[in-house]
Amino acid sequence: MSLTVTEHALVLHILTQLRDENTPHEAYFSLTHTLSRILLIEATRYLPLASFPMRTPMEETTGARISKPIVLVPILRAGLGMLSAATELLPSAKIGFLGLQRNETTAIAESYYCKLPEMVSATAIILDPMLATGGSAEQAIVRLMTEGVEEIILVCAVASPEGVEYLTEHFPDVHIVVGALDRCLNAQKYILPGLGDFGDRLFGT
């Protein structure tokens, strides 16, 4: 597994606003959209390319296009906030949905919805703003592997060291791109300093 912590002034600037308890939910979608766009540009940096002959207005040259099918997989509900930026950058990508809900007693994610397109030999990009224990990511990764994906990239706004360590141990081939690697998890398995419940803040619930 490889971990990329995006070092960009705008990422830190936007994350500060997302962390601020006084930021209203009305601002969350636009902030999340901009942050996701930066993270996805980094996450797609090394997608495989295929060369092909083409012509500019001036001459013949060689072009490049993404050579593998892409499937975007937002984790419901918070991952929906990242989807619009992803579809802008990758308009031909297919979209699948995984619904995973945290059990507040056990802190273990429970699956309640799954709708995926054909994924054999595809690159799957999981969109999930928070990587805490790694439990939700694990369920998503295992499910996508059973569908035959060739590569998995996990894109998160904020991650905990515990979650990263867990995924590193269990899924060494998954690439993780995050906006920030936070300090730790608290006793309730929430990220510190974190930013609270991303889905609740995004949707005002």
Image (cartoon, rainbow, N blue to C red):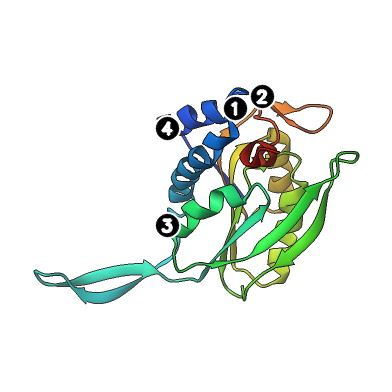
Write down the residue under mark 4: 10
Viewer-nearest residue: 6 or 156: 156
Query: In the rendered image, is residue 200 in sight?
Result: yes
**Which type of secondary structure does the marked residue at label 2 adopt?**
loop
Residue in the image at 36% along x and 69% along y: 65
Q: CA distance from mark 3 to mark 1?
A: 25 Å
Write down the residue under mark 1: 19
Write down the residue under mark 2: 193
Q: Nearer the viewer, mark 1 or mark 4?
A: 1
Specify the farthest residue to the right: 105
Mark 2 residue type: Pro
Q: Residues within 10 Å of mark 3 (few under 14, many from 20)?
A: few
User: Between disc 1 and disc 2, whose residue precedes?
Assistant: 1
Q: Residues within 10 Å of mark 1 (few under 14, many from 20)?
A: some
Q: CA distance from mark 1 to mark 2?
A: 8 Å
Examine the rendered structure and indicate whether residue 30 appears above or below residue 73.
above
Mark 1 residue type: Arg
User: Between disc 3 and disc 2, whose residue precedes?
Assistant: 3
